[in-house]
Image: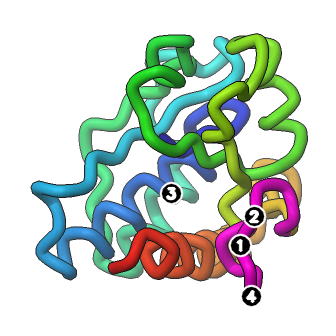
Amino acid sequence: MFVCHGNICRSPMAEFVMKSLVEKSSLSAEVYIESSATSREEIGNGIYPPAEHILSMHGIPCTGHRARQFTVDDYNNFDLVVVMEDYNKRNLTRLIGCDCKGKVWKLLDFTASEPAPGIGADISDPWYHGNFDKTYNEIVAGCKALMKYLGY
């Protein structure tokens, strides 16, 4: 499960990039991927148009996405909960109480030579800086590293 603040930019970008990588590796039957938000403000909204545009420029479809909030059931049902930044992790902790099972990682934690929760940089937020190319490249690097971490 990929998580960001509103589930309209970074987490759906990560969801669809990861789905694309998984599909290209013929692993769709083995890996289940979703995304969600820590906030409620964008619930029901589609992916933000500039995020959708950058994905389409790279041939990655993202149809049917609707923002939703992360739940305690998500924490219990997913093996990994991958946030985009420290701020998301703090907000997620407010929703779930604690990461008692050690499932919460930042996406760029996986890019470290020895991956571990909390050591990676934040994925930059294009909502504020408008550079969707930069965010896309960070997400691709993180997703490729996550694939490697998972043994694929």
What residue is at 47 percent from the left and 81 percent from the top?
148
Measured Cα–Cα span from mark 3 to mark 4: 24 Å
Identify the magenta region.
109-120
From the image, tell me which residue sits under label 2: 116
Which residue is the site of mark 1?
115
> Which residue matches tag 3?
13
Q: Nearer the viewer, mark 2 or mark 3?
A: 2
Disc nearest the viewer among 3 and 4: 4
Residue under numbered circle 4: 113
Q: Residue at x 81, y 14 (%)?
A: 94
For the residues labelled 1 and 4, the Cα–Cα distance comes to 6 Å
Side of 30 relative to 138 (left or right): left
Farthest residue toward the front? 101
Q: CA distance from mark 2 to mark 1?
A: 4 Å
Where 52 falls versus 145 (above or below)?
Answer: above
- Within 10 Å of disc 1 (Cα), the crowding (few <14, some 14-19, many 20+) is some
Q: Is residue 103 above or below residue 124?
A: above
**Residue 5, position as x, y percentages in the image:** 72, 33
Q: Earlier in the sequence, mark 3 or mark 4?
A: 3
Mark-to-mark CA distance, 2 and 3: 22 Å
Label 4, label 2: how far apart the Cα atoms are: 9 Å
Could you say whether the residue bearing mark 3 is in a helix, strand or loop? helix
- The reply, left or right, for residue 30 in relation to residue 13 is left
